[in-house]
Amino acid sequence: MIHEIDEALRRLLAPAVTGEIAFDAPTRDWAARRNTPTLNAYLYDIREDVARRERGAVAERDADGIVTRRRQPPRWFRLSYLVTAWTSRPEDEHRLLSGALALLLPHEVLAGDAVPESVRPIATSLPLSVAVPPAESRSLADIWSALGGELKPSLDVVVTTPFPVTPVYEAAPPVTEGAEVVVRGIDGVPADSRPRMRRRVGGGA
């Protein structure tokens, strides 16, 4: 599913650059090998969107309406990309970023053919946000420090998508017989089979 989101972003960003669209970690070594204008969309964070988590299970029924399986609801994840431009001149990089921003801003969602086939049975559109400030736990400066590179202008692009594979549990066959209750004594013998004590009514032993 993640690689399908990569391809959706590649198609969306393709008109902005005449060179290459990459998904590599933008390290110093990678940057030194660039010899063509490049837009890089580095997937730097994957985390569940817990606000979308659903409880319970979804029943799957056969043609007769009998429950055959139960499936857990899909879990949604936020895929965060660091989009940067790489050329030999800062002005050209800014031009690439401007073109990427112009392509991304009209899309508040990925829809239609941009939605991966694997998730279309679950969602017909996927939320997309551009340049929204990241959470405090995700400092872009820390990301660049971890990559060993110098801080560059970037666009934070987040796509929220369900993961199409969910746990499935087989359902037991339907109950066709009534319930039976057996009362037993403390010795485990059914009450109906225990010998009964009779009380004599009247005086005398």
Image (cartoon, rainbow, N blue to C red):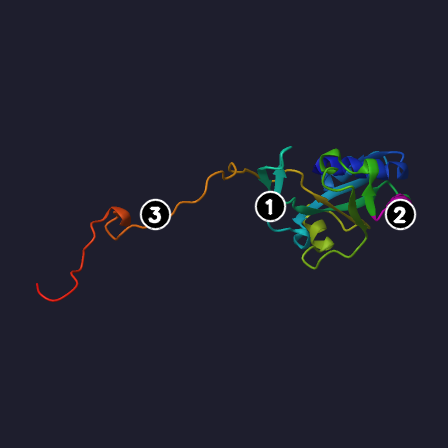
The residue to which callout 1 is attached is 57
Rendered image: mark on residue 182: 3
Looking at the picture, which amino acid does disc 1 mark? Ala
Disc 3 is placed on an element classified as loop
Q: Tags 3 and 2 in contact by the CB under 8 Å rule?
A: no
Near-viewer residue (172 or 101): 172
The local crowd at label 1, few if under 14, some if 14 to 19, many if 20 or more residues have their Cα within 10 Å, is some
Q: Quote the CA–CA distance across marks 3 and 2.
A: 69 Å
Q: Secondary structure at mark 1?
A: loop
Label 3 Cα crowd, 10 Å radius (few <14 / some 14-19 / many 20+): few
Q: Residues within 10 Å of mark 2 (few under 14, many from 20)?
A: few
Q: Nearer the viewer, mark 1 or mark 3?
A: 3
Identify the residue at image location x=79%, y=55%.
132
Q: Which residue is mark 2?
A: 106
The percent position of residue 100, horizontal first and vertical second, equals: 87, 44
Q: Quadrant of the N terminus?
A: top right
* In-front residue for pair 119/23: 119
**First in sequence: mark 3 vs mark 2:** 2
Q: Is residue 190 visible?
A: no
Left or right of residue 101: residue 145: left
Q: Earlier in the sequence, mark 1 or mark 3?
A: 1
Magenta span of residues = 95-108
Q: Mark 2 or mark 1: which is in front?
A: 1
| Residue located at (89% from left, 39% from top) | 16
